[in-house]
Image: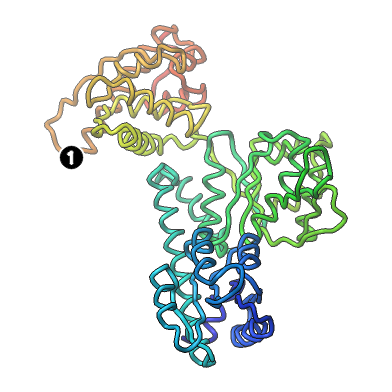
């Protein structure tokens, strides 16, 4: 392995060396740390101490003696792998006890070394063990990404706005700067935060998301920054908080505009100094955390109202991403709806359903004030109540009768008169015919009142006016 390339991958990794002979453990730690600059080599002297170190911060490699008082190396092996399955375990054994080493390999150890240890062999085992852990963590990360996509956790859409958003996320992910994600509720702010984390250099480290308004104001400070034992009633032990738990990773602070001035002040200290001070403690703790904040509020208005600190605003708003509401990227709605239908059918164990083009067209024209979340919930309702494998406008009207959305009017759509030819052209003709028939019928019903027609159809006035302009229609002729 090229040592320069190896050191690049080793930066920030950790190896724990366990031996009840303190000098021996410290000597191995110095040797390993000297050969791998950037590697955190920790020497401990018992199995219990090793488990405590592992609980504080994950390690990639553990080298442990087999024969130790209180807890044997085999017992430590089982407990450490239960806590961190991707940990590479190497056991040390004296000459003549190879049988015990074989037993350790069967129990899950990655490799073993015999005492006295040959330095070159030790270095080779450490290199391979660290590389093994890195590959296991990478595989685990990819499985998580694939699992999240299977559950709908991906950005769906091929419109201009969505393509630009994906390029922006990829660029932002390559930096370590703080990010402010803005957009209405249901536009996918947490999904964007997760994508930034998974595409960046911290992908193998923790990602913690916290919805700030969901935690009572008097507890949010403790939840984020931790507290010391006895700092308030019920604080019967130290609590390290989410920032400390996300060390070397990413924390997503959702609805950042709702936090109190006191928490704003402490958050500013984290961003400026890279440290947190737990509630009731007189000492600060260093943390290395990338912050991604999000909000659906007008922070500039909050600055003018003096409810949000200006210095915190500029610390958070280093990089900014604004998510468009679904009504402003309606071209993506049919693709999103099709995806959600497939997911819902899979969740319910049903065969995939055929969706009529009229349904997709109606969906694309609906404003969806709850954005992607509302669209997905509506698709789930359609899937639940569909009596067959076809979703048509009759089913849409049935589901809409519960008041969740304006009930769409039935519209007769003339079939294309030309012989069948290109599918997209034929489909476009049907869709245009539907739109024209729908507009004529709704304007006739409202006697040319565009505002009332927009209310009935579930469109914004601007969206309906754009449709009229595209069709070359004038509402005046219906008055």
Identified at 52% across, 93% down, the residue is 118
Rendering coords of residue 141 (x, y %)? 46, 59
Q: How is the image coloured?
A: rainbow
Q: How many marks?
A: 1
In this view, which residue lies farthest toward the right?
282
On the image, the x and y values in percent for residue 103 come to 41, 73
Q: Secondary structure at mark 1?
A: loop
Left or right of 161? Residue 353 is: left
Q: Using the image, determine if residue 331 lies above or below residue 242.
A: above
Quadrant the C terminus occupies:
top left
Report the residue at 41% width, 56% height from top: 143
- Say whether residue 477 is left or right of residue 417: right
Furthest toward the left, the residue is 419
User: Which quarter of the figure has residue 347?
Assistant: top left
**Residue position marked by numbered label 1 in the rendering:** 422
Answer few, some or many: residues within 10 Å of disc 1's Cα (few below 14, many 20 plus, some between 14 and 19): few
The image shows residue 165, relative to residue 350, as above or below, that is below
Q: Which one is nearer the viewer's eye here, 272 or 55? A: 55
Residue 327 pos. (x, y %): 49, 31
Q: Does residue 300 appear to the left or right of 384 in the view shown?
A: right
Viewer-proximal residue, 127 or 418?
Answer: 127
Instruction: From the viewer's side, name the closer residue of 216 and 101.
Output: 101
Which residue is nearer to you in this view: 120 or 456? 120
Q: Is residue 122 above or below residue 262?
A: below
Q: Position of residue 65 (x, y in %)?
A: 55, 78
């Amino acid at each position: 392995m090229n040592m320069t390339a190896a050191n690049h991958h080793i930066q920030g990794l950790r190896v724990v060396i366990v031996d009840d002979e303190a000098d021996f453990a410290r000597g191995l730690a110095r040797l390993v740390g000297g050969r791998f600059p950037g590697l955190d080599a920790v020497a401990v002297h018992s199995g219990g101490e090793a488990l405590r170190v592992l609980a504080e911060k994950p390690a990639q490699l553990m080298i442990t003696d087999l024969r130790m008082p209180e807890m044997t190396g085999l017992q430590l092996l089982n407990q450490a792998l239960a806590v961190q399955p991707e940990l590479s375990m190497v056991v040390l054994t004296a000459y003549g006890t190879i049988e015990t080493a074989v037993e350790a390999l069967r129990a899950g150890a990655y490799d073993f070394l015999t005492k006295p240890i040959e330095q070159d062999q030790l270095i080779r085992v450490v290199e391979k063990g660290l590389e093994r852990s890195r590959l296991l963590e990478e595989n685990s990360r990819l499985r998580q990404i694939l699992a999240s996509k299977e559950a709908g956790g991906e950005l769906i859409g091929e419109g201009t706005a969505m393509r630009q958003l994906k390029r922006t996320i990829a660029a932002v992910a390559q930096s370590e700067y703080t990010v402010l994600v803005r957009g209405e509720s249901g536009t996918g702010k947490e999904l964007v935060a997760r994508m930034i984390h998974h595409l960046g250099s911290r992908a193998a480290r923790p990602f913690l998301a916290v919805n700030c308004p969901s935690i009572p104001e008097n507890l949010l400070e403790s939840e984020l920054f931790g507290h010391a034992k006895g700092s308030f009633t019920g604080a019967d032990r130290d609590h390290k908080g989410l920032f400390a738990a996300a060390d070397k990773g990413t924390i997503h602070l959702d609805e950042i505009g709702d936090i109190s001035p006191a928490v704003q002040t402490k958050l500013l200290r984290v961003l400026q100094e890279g440290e947190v001070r737990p509630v009731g403690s007189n000492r600060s703790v260093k943390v290395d955390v990338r912050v991604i904040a999000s909000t659906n509020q007008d922070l500039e208005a909050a600055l003018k109202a003096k409810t949000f600190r200006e210095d915190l605003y500029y610390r958070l708003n280093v990089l900014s991403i604004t998510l468009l509401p679904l009504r402003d990227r309606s071209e993506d709605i049919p693709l999103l709806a099709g995806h959600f239908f497939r997911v819902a059918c899979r969740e319910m164990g049903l065969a995939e359903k055929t969706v009529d083009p009229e349904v997709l067209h109606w969906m694309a024209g609906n404003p969806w004030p709850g954005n992607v979340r509302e669209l997905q919930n509506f698709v789930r309702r359609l899937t639940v109540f569909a009596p067959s494998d076809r979703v048509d406008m009759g089913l849409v009207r049935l589901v809409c009768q519960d008041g969740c959305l304006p009930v769409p009017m039935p519209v007769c759509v003339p079939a294309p008169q030309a012989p069948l030819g290109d599918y997209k052209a034929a489909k476009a003709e049907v869709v245009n015919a539907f739109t024209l028939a729908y507009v004529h019928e709704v304007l006739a019903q409202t006697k040319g009142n565009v505002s009332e027609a927009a209310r009935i159809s579930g469109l914004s006035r601007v969206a309906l006016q754009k449709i009229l302009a595209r069709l070359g229609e004038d509402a005046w002729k219906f008055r």
